[in-house]
Every structure is written in structure tokens, then in C-alpha cells.
Image (cartoon, rainbow, N blue to C red):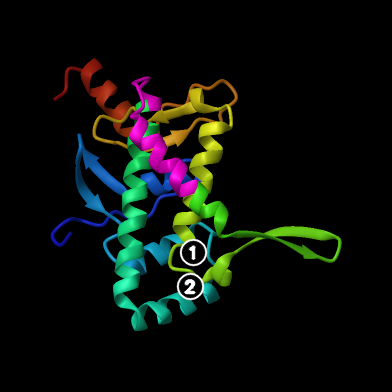
Amino acid sequence: MSGIEAPPFAFVAGSTCLDFANTATRDEEAIVGESLARFEDLISWGVSAHILTPVDAERTRAAARERSQDACAALARAVALREEVFRTFAALAERRPVAPQGVAALDRAQRDAFAHRALVADGHCFRWEWDGGGTAFDGVLWRVAESAAELLAGGRLERVRRCAGEECTRLFLDTSRGGGRRWCEMRHCGNVAKVRRFRTRHGDR
Ligand SMILES: [Zn+2]
């Protein structure tokens, strides 16, 4: 991935799996910006997404230095899942048919994630706990897989959108009251479109 620019992490999608899908920028099918070039980036994303605590992240980074091949393999699995998430939800956003093998891959990922989740009693409360206690190399992947499955089966698919920005490929979940959100970020893509409309109206180039 050397030579490909790393865009900063953005959390604008309103959904963990879509924010994860947005960690690459694309030109049509080709990836032209990669935020997850190293396993370390995946862990940093997990902290920014509030999936990992900073303490877990530090422990995971230390373990990854000892087991760099395993860490590389975990990064490859996470990026492969990201591409399935992107393809599936981009198709849904554009009302195109969804590839059955993509759905099968997401299903395999959520089954695998579920197999690593335990229900833990804590006094009168209960919570989910993940294998490895936050330091598993696949921890971020499991949470993304869970998020994708919940979004697919959650009955809000008609609100999955692709940013209307001309050069933007970000996906998001439109949670606005009227369902009329068009941009990933108003201050970015929304403003670019506004300026373009202004210039067109005023005969500027
Ligand atoms: Zn955008």
C-alpha cells in the first residue's frame, strides 16, 4: 500500500460498519486512499471508534510486536471484511442487486464474531464480553461484523446512502428526521457542492 495516501479517520456514518467501510477512499473500484495500511492503524481505529480502550490497545500493540505475522493476517482479514461491507452496502445504497457471495461472507463473519462473544453476569446486570478481553487481534473485525449484521437485519436499509459528493465514496446511515441527508459531511462535501452551484449560477468556472 506504499505510496497511497492515508486519509484521516472520519466518524460521520452513524454506523460502526459504515465508518469502517469509509476507511478507504475509492475511485470507482480502485482504492486510492488507505487508512488501514498497518495493524497499528486498525487498533488506532478501534480506539477512535470506542471499540477498544486505550489500555487494551496498548496491550494489543505489544502482543502484535511479538506476533507480527498473526497481526498481519488479522489486518488482512479485517480489510477483506471491510471490502465486503463496502460492496454490499454501496449496492444497497444505490438500489443495485447485492452479490450473494458478499452476504455469505458477512454471514460467516457474524457467525464467527458471535462464537467469540460470551454473556457475563455482573451483579444484577449482564453484559457481552469478547474473547481475549479486548486484546484479541480480531476484536475490531468482530465488532464490525456484528454491526454489519445488525444493520442488514435492522429494518433501516432504505436509509443507507452514498454521499452525493462528486468525488466522495463514503457511505452513511441517514438518521435525519426527514430522511433527506445527502452528504457525508456538510462542511466538506456539502460545501463543495454549494460552491459549485454558486459558480454555475454566476457563470464562473
Ligand atoms: Zn462525502
Q: Which residues are magenta?
A: 92-110
Q: Position of residue 27 (x, y in %)?
A: 19, 38
Please tell me how crowded label 1 is: few (under 14), some (14-19), or many (20+) other residues with Cα within 10 Å: some
Question: Is there any visible trace of residue 61 in the rendered image?
Answer: yes
Q: Indicate yes or no whether the magenta region holds residue 178.
A: no
Q: What type of secondary structure mainly makes up the magenta span? A: helix
Image coordinates of residue 133 in percent, x first then y, are 58, 70
Task: Give the labeled residue for mark 1.
Answer: 47
- Read off the residue under disc 2: 57
User: Residue at left 43%, top 42%?
Assistant: 106
The residue lying toward the viewer, choosing from 179 and 84, is 84
Amino acid beneath label 2:
Ala
Q: Residues within 10 Å of mark 2 (few under 14, many from 20)?
A: many
Quadrant where the C terminus sits is top left
In the rendering, at what x and y percent does residue 37 appear? 26, 61
Whether residues under marks 1 and 2 lie with C-beta atoms below 8 angstroms apart, the answer is yes
User: Which residue is rendered at x = 25% and y = 29% of the image?
Assistant: 166
Please state which of residues 39 and 121 is positioned toward the viewer in this rendering. Answer: 121
The one of 24 and 97 positioned closer to us in this rendering = 97
What's under tag 1, amino acid-wise? Answer: Val
Give SS at disc 2: helix
In the drawing, does residue 30 fall left or right of residue 13? left
Q: Is residue 188 visible?
A: no
Q: Quadrant of residue 118?
A: bottom right
Asked whether mark 1 lies closer than 8 Å to ligand 1, one says no
Q: Which mark is residue 75?
A: none
Residue depicted at 26% across the width and 45% down the height: 25
Tag 1 secondary structure: helix
**Where's residue 126, x and y in %?**
77, 58
